[in-house]
Image: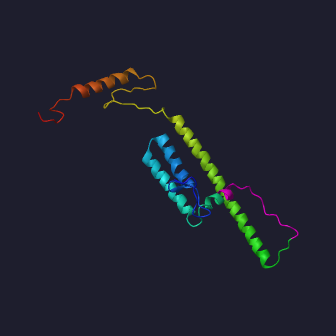
Amino acid sequence: MDKYHIPQHLDTPFKIVIWTADEFLVFVVPFLVVLSIFNAPLTGVAIGGGLMMILKKLKGEEGHHFLLHLTYLVSATRCPLQSDSTIVLSGDRRMKHLLQYSRLQHLIQYRNGYLILASISLILNMLLVLAIFLLIGHERIVIVPSIIEKSFWVTENQVSPDYLLQMSRDFANLRLNVTASNAGIPA
């Protein structure tokens, strides 16, 4: 193999196997997260593949630098346009300048709104992950007898004597009362 890679075009993005670096990350990160947390590789592949298709659709006509420019638009600090007093715009040029300025202000408002929504969504997702980790291992399974004769109670470490009595009678009844004739098995 050659020691150096010569790109075919001037702005060819870095590729990992057949994907660009951003497509690879969008596929691999959800796959690894789902695999490590839920041990579900097919779900990870589905989520990663879906996100990669969305990314390719977003980049479609604009090219691979579209997301870089979008990230800059979202993360850039708000700085209003300053008019230079030495340049005097008149007529059509002034109208175009004012239209561009109003469109830019409109886009900045949209960017800020979506940035707030994304921040709220990120915080809620982090709280959800924290709640899931705190609830792991606190689920409770209580087996009840088929016929409840008396009231009973069950806590994390103890059960009432009535519960033990009813459960032992229920298990004994199920274990010792089943024969081939009453189970429907031909002899």
- The answer to whether 4 appears left or right of 154 in the picture is right
**Magenta region includes residue 183:** no
Q: Which of 26 and 110 is in front in this view?
A: 26
- Position in image of residue 160 (x %, y %): 40, 22
- Position in image of residue 48 (x %, y %): 49, 52
In which quadrant of the rendered view does residue 39 lie?
Answer: top left
- Position in image of residue 80 (x %, y %): 78, 61
Task: Point out the residue furthest to the top here.
Answer: 161
Q: How many marks?
A: 0
Q: Which of 88 and 11 is in front in this view?
A: 11
Task: Point out the residue furthest to the front here.
Answer: 2
- The answer to whether 71 appears left or right of 147 in the picture is right
With respect to residue 78, does 158 lie above or below? above
- Residue for point 63% across, 49% down: 120
- Residue for point 77% across, 75% down: 95
With respect to residue 14, does 87 lie above or below? below
Coloring scheme of the render?
Answer: rainbow
Query: Which segment did they paint magenta?
Result: 71-86
- The answer to whether 56 appears left or right of 104 in the picture is left
- Position in image of residue 30 (x %, y %): 52, 48
Magenta stretch, overall SS: loop
In which quadrant of the rendered view does residue 165 lie?
Answer: top left
- The answer to whether 93 appears left or right of 16 in the picture is right
| Quadrant the C terminus occupies | top left
